Amino acid sequence: MPKGKGAKGTKVTLKIAKKAIRMTRDGGRRLNLSKMGITIFPKCLLKLTNVDEVDLSRNMIQKIPDNIGSFSSLRRLDLHSNKLESVPESIGNLAGLTHLNLSNNRLTSAGLPSTLGSLSSLKSLNLGLNQLDTLPPTMAALESLQELGLFDNLFTKLPEFVKELSNLTKLNTKRNPLVYAQADNEGMLKGKCEPEENVYLVHESNLCRTCFKSCKEQRERLCEGGGGGEGVMCEDKRIRTYRGLMVPNSVAAVNQDVWRIRKVEHKPDK
């Protein structure tokens, strides 16, 4: 355990960081500094040019250094459960980054840089449990993105470009105040429509043959205005029929991971 923990938080030196590096099963080098009471991002970590993964989750970090983009060896960066309010533009220089977890922070849409769209190798991006209502349009360029977590935010509608992310197979939008189009006999009205629990976008290749047929028939009925003669197609149904993506995941051949991070530390005393 690092020394020097006090009112200003734990101080991590380069020596301490080097001792915390471990080899991963695939031969990479992982630095785990989770739950260390760190309040300031240790800039000395940027000197570790041979580290592939950095875990700084469950700390109290308020800011990512502006020169984070110089951490060129980084492939995975986990900063969930901190106190971040923004992300520096230089993060777009991390061309090799494949996994980025920024969930359970204090991020607002104004704090997300347009350079997120430059992370061409990014496969997984978790932005859940923040204060976001929009995403940078430049993220439409994230052609490698497969997993996107947007749960527990302030989205009233999903960004249009999400439909065009051709490799996206998992999207979690649970617990957002999404507004969907609803219809009555006199015309279209807008209103809130509670999303179904435990529903994700799932690629059709992950469904068994029976479930694929069932989902396809259901989608066709919705598109034709069927479903008991109601003639209504709620927009949340359309949202979950992006090209190459189908629902529900409850019958998918491959189980989906649980994205939600439950913060259990720092419980108030009774």
Image (tube, grey):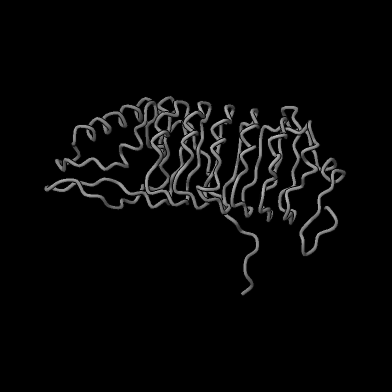
Q: Kindly give the residue lying farthest to the bottom in the view shown.
A: 270
Q: Residue at x 64, y 53 (%)?
A: 82
Q: Looking at the picture, how far across and down is residue 69, in whole percent?
A: 68, 35
Residue name at image x 46 percent, y 42 percent: 172
Judging depth in this view, the residue of 168 and 68 nearest the camera is 68
Q: Residue furthest right?
A: 15
User: Which quarter of the rendered picture does the C terminus lie within?
Assistant: bottom right
Within the image, what quadrant is residue 77 found in?
A: top right
48 vs 199, nearest the viewer: 48
Q: Residue at x 39, y 26 (%)?
A: 244
Quarter residue 90 falls in: top right
Front residue (pair 93, 128): 93
Q: In the displayed structure, does residue 259 sit left or right of residue 201? A: right
- Where residue 171 appears, x then y in whole percent? 46, 38
Could you say where residue 40 lies in the image, as x and y percent from the top left? 73, 52
Find the residue positioned furthest to the left.
186
Please determine whether, in this image, residue 206 is positioned above or below residue 183: above
Q: Residue at x 40, y 27 (%)?
A: 204
Residue 95 in picture, x, y percent from top left: 64, 28
The quarter of the picture where residue 214 lies is: top left
